[in-house]
Amino acid sequence: MASTTKGKTRTESDIEKYREEGEWRKILELAQSIGSDGGKNGLIEFLLGEAKLELYLEGGDLIRGQNLLKESRAHLKSCLNASNCSALQVDANLLLAKLHFMSGEQSLAAKVIEASGISSIIGGEKPLPFRIMKLVAESFAIKGMCLEKEKNVDKGLEKAIICLTKASDLTLRYLQNMEKHLGPYANVSVGPILETGIQRAPILFMQNDQIAKAFNQYRNIMNACETQSTLNTRQVVSRKLAELILRNVSRSCWTPFDTSITTISGHWKPHRYFGQSLFNPREREEEIVLLLLISELLASRNVVLDRGTEFNDTRRQSLENVIAIHDLLVIALTPFKYCILDMFERAMKFSFEIKHIWLQFGLSVMETKKFPLRAILIFKEVARIDDSDPVPCILAAKVYILELNNAEKALEFALEALSRDTEGAMSSRINLTLGIVNAILYEEETETVKKLKKVHLHESIRYFKNLIKGPVEDHLAYYHIGLHMAHQRVINDSMHHAQLALVLNPYHLPSIQLMILCLSACKKYHEALSLCEASLEEYPDQLVLLYVKANLEQVVSENGYEIALQTAKHMLRCCKNLPNEDKDKVLYCGNNVTLTGTNYDTLSLKMEQTLSEIVSLDSCPVLGDGAITSGPGLEDGSLGQKQLWNLQLHLWILIAELYIKLGLISEAEACVAEVANVVFGPLSHQLMFVKGILAKARQRYAEAKAYFQNAISINPRHARALQQLGHSYYLLGNQLSADKYLRDSLNVDATLHETWSHMGCVLNELGEHKSAADCLVTAIQLEATAPIYPSILHQEMFLSDFSLVSIESLKFVL
């Protein structure tokens, strides 16, 4: 061949060096400066033809490029006619085939390559020079792309894949050799033919329904030793391999990469990674995330930061590439509730006014549940970037509700979303959000502001009715209206709407729970228990249903308290047996439902946390996974930890109350003492409340009064603590104080018939007999429609994929 001729002159050595390094202008100048010696005419024509062809591929001037192409064709044909060197003729034929291919003469290019006998070139043991290796790789790539267009599709595709695979291996080996020759920081361009050819074989495999072979081919490319020149290829291939796994490879079909089959090497095979220290993903998701992280890191480095107008197209393309990788990572990680904040932090340097990246960043921050204020600021920035999009406003409303407990701010953002939704595309989600926010405000307002409370009630119902009038019926609308009917103690209407919700979504657990409580409010305890047991057959470990069942069993069964106690102990075993990774999913079934205490607000949680820390860090409760905390995951913001903590809290209260009802006061005290620090926290208002109940059961009314006072000092809105404090004052003979605290309890929750009954007794003692009679009548009316347990659930919302799913209260409040 031309590159292996012996007795090179100094000029020929320079030419060979420039050919390997791709310095085509210098080659052109040297070839033109060499004399027209007869022995060198063929070589000069070859060099001129090669240099002009490569300059045509590098250039962007179409008119000048066409001239270069014509001149190159003439030089190469002249070389073939003038040269007697077989090696030079093979090289000239390969270049001529390349020229035919670039001119659109694909069949002619394939014939020329076939006639040149390139298979014999890589069949020997002798290593190939750099330039020849690249030329042969291009020839295989051209032959493969030409065979792809043949009429005989099956044979053509099979041969094309073989050629493109060889081209891929030769290209990678060529780049590895060039790195050794030029140094580790040299960036060698292989040209458009090889850039296309190296990625074409897996595509043909997929077109031929050979997914496994495409999968392995991509893996082989990724397993080749990396060079500076292969970084762009590695970025594209890693992304495409991740997409292939996501779309076409299931968990059952996925297998780890077998590195033993990649150690075979040769002069035309690329070097590959192998050895004990090689990281090899052992799970499908692990490989997807690894590939996407590699692709994202490489793509982020290549984003064009220059905002000049001449770079607009390049910057847009590089940004779209990064955004696509971000989306794939979100798709891959979302099912596992993971997010990568660092990735979006890196993206901020090139994300000025890029709405999509800001929105993804905000969603990731929001899902961590650690930085709610930062999430709000990000959503505000998204809303500023696009002042017509209602989505960031809905997301901000969600954060204010779930993380910051600020329904007023949530209402502002929800109304802003409504004003932006001019086309009505998000009307259903906005109406649902506004309905939920107004429902929360309705529950938060005390009885002293009945007018404002009534406004929120009517607004909430109006938005839910707007949701029903929408193009698609939503079970959540019927559920919420049923919930409001239950609040108003219109039980029949509430049951009707719960039934409609279950018709639309039979697996909606809050609607099932609402139906159970409505049945219990109608005193149909057996039917309620039957429905609860039937639901538990579908969801055997659904702890909220088990909690409701325990309360129903107290009324229905002959030995109700003993049976309920066994159910409560079963719940406790279920809770303790949860593996650590499932604790965040403790109540995640259909739509999340959270056990919380009556009027259990975040302010009291934080107060308990502060007081507990003042008392002793060692006395803070320890959750099942060993994390020390004085509240439901306040430090890490984990919703699952909050749910687990609240569940344990209510469960132990239930067990203690059952022991009291069975007359086993000592067992109840031992139960509370055992879990005082583990579940409640040393200064929890719930712990104070339970201790007050125990003291009251032993007729230690002064001691009980002190405990109830401690409870309301921590949480002034605990309705049952206020009720019991008032009743304790009544039993101690202090009717004025009893009247005051019972009124406070009614101001917080006016649906507790026990409070009205105690109020009637107190007013009777004070001589206000007419008012006492009214209170007792109210108590009788409320008791007639009281559910089995009036304050089981708390109100929350959950947002996923821009759609609100409610996790609402089943608490009947007036």
Image (cartoon, rainbow, N blue to C red):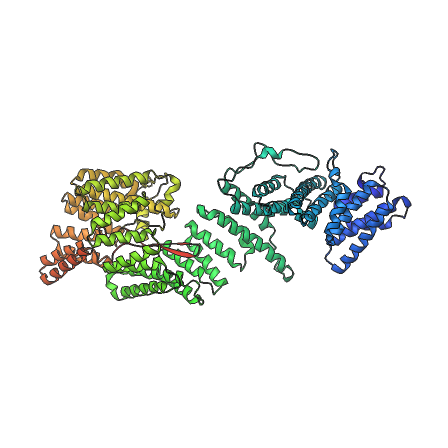
For the image shown, how many numbered marks are present on the structure?
0
Along the viewing direction, whichever of 676 and 560 lies nearer the viewer? 560
Of the 4 image quadrants, the one containing the C terminus is bottom left
- Where residue 677 appears, as percent x and y from the top left, is 29, 40
Lateral position of residue 311 relative to residue 515, left or right: right
- Where residue 760 appears, as percent x and y from the top left, is 13, 57
Residue 749 in view: yes
Indicate whether 605 appears above or below 221.
below
Along the viewing direction, whichever of 585 and 268 lies nearer the viewer? 268
Residue 188 in view: no
- Where residue 721 appears, as percent x and y from the top left, is 22, 51
Lateral position of residue 610 relative to residue 198, left or right: left
Q: Which residue is drawn at 63% across and 46% down?
A: 199
Lateral position of residue 704 relative to residue 272, left or right: left
Along the viewing direction, whichever of 677 and 427 lies nearer the viewer? 427
Q: Residue at x 52, y 51 (%)?
A: 326
Of the 4 image quadrants, the one containing the N terminus is top right
Quarter of the image for residue 775 reads bottom left
| Outermost residue toward the front in this view | 152
Q: Which residue is drawn at 72% across and 43% down?
A: 134
- Where residue 96 appears, as percent x and y from the top left, is 78, 49
Indicate whether 809 appears above or below 664.
below
Lateral position of residue 277 relative to residue 803, left or right: right
Quarter of the image for residue 494 reads bottom left
